[in-house]
Amino acid sequence: MNDIEACRTPALGGQLYVCTNCAKERYSYHSCKNRHCPKCQNDQATQWLGRQESLLLPVGHFLVTFTFPEELRAIARSNQQSLYNILFRASSRALAKLAGDPRHLGAQLGMIGVLHTWTRDLRYHPHVHYVVTGGGLDSNGRWRSPRNQFLVPGKPLALIFRAKVRDLLRKAGLLNQVDNRVWRKDWVVDLEPVGSGLSAFKYLAPYIFRVAISNNRILSLDDGNVTFKYKDRAAGRTRLATLSAEEFIRRFLQHVLPPGFVKVRYYGLLSPSKRRLLQTARTQLDGSIHNYLQQTALFPQVAQAAQPQTCSDCGGPLKLVAVLAPLKLQPP
């Protein structure tokens, strides 16, 4: 919270520019670079997209979403490090196991997973999104594509995921804290095609760098209440939520990840240790990856050169005239 409050303010220092035409001064303050700060994440998605170029395959991709059922959310909130790791391990292993079954795909997929813990109105809802290659390499190193445009069946995938979560909770010594009824209910895993590798990565990038709420969604702060907008996906409309400041802060802070927790993970063909297999897959697929990149105009925003800073009043060039030191913190 201290980082967010100080972000892009005199507290962190910065630079003073002056327009050489009209002499208008412009202050540019430093960012806090906290990964949960709404102001600091806008440019990182573009940079991340550029770094993923070497991972692209000219095939369709799928978005697969695994969600903890409601009965596990309280224990997840109290044991975030353990439960988030369990969510990643159980989901990635379930997907790899079913895809590796010769009755389905019989191949090793490429997967990128990202943890997401909030709903649009900031409630606690831990789940993980995977962007998955539409196909993979079999045990003989041959590329295999999904049958009938389906990656793997959803119901068996949910059953395997549930069983692996239960096994990992037992190993972590947390199983006795879970209501047994959760193991008798149906779990849901969502699978949907998301188009090319470019489309898939563009879809995933905001989830990697977006925080629970951005500043442009906050509409007002009046009489100790915060009003913000959110999209009701089920109703297909935008709604307003008004919370007390304390409740708003509570909802925001429950999505702050444990220190050092890695929220983006690579598996299968996309894991760093399997890049040789990724190249094998690429050479077997129709067409050239380089032609594919050119035809789909990948990452045009990365190729653009940074524009020089200009005056917002007259458009004249800005000149750096001073470096501003961070303010010393005053004792409480």
Image (cartoon, rainbow, N blue to C red):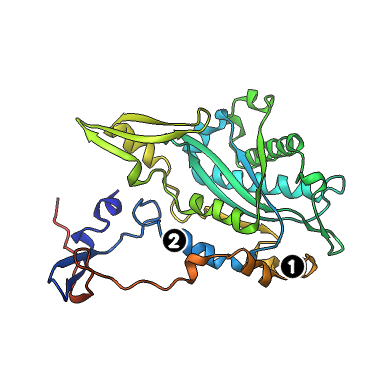
In the drawing, does residue 212 fall left or right of residue 197? left
- Residue 133 location (% of width, % of height): 70, 55
**Which three-letter amino acid code belongs to the residue tagged 1?**
Arg
Residue in view at x 59 percent, y 46 percent? 129
Q: Are marks 2 and 1 in contact (CB under 8 Å)?
A: no
Question: In the rendered structure, which amino acid carries the disc numbered 2?
Answer: Gln
For marks 2 and 1, the one nearer the N-term is 2
Q: Label 1: which residue?
A: 282
Q: Secondary structure at mark 1?
A: helix
Crowd class of label 1 (few under 14; some 14 to 19; many from 20; radius 10 Å): some
The answer to whether residue 30 is above or below residue 127 is below
Q: Can you tell which mark lies on residue 74?
A: none
Q: Is 150 rendered above or below residue 238?
A: below
In the picture, measured across the screen, residue 328 lies left or right of residue 36, that is: left
Q: Nearer the viewer, residue 157 or 195?
A: 195
Alpha carbons under labels 2 and 1: distance apart: 27 Å
At a point 32% along the width and 29% down the height, the residue shown is: 242
Task: Please provide percent x and percent y for residue 226.
Answer: 28, 34
Q: Is residue 88 left or right of residue 143?
A: left
Residue 65: x and y, percent? 62, 42
User: Mark number for residue 44?
Assistant: 2
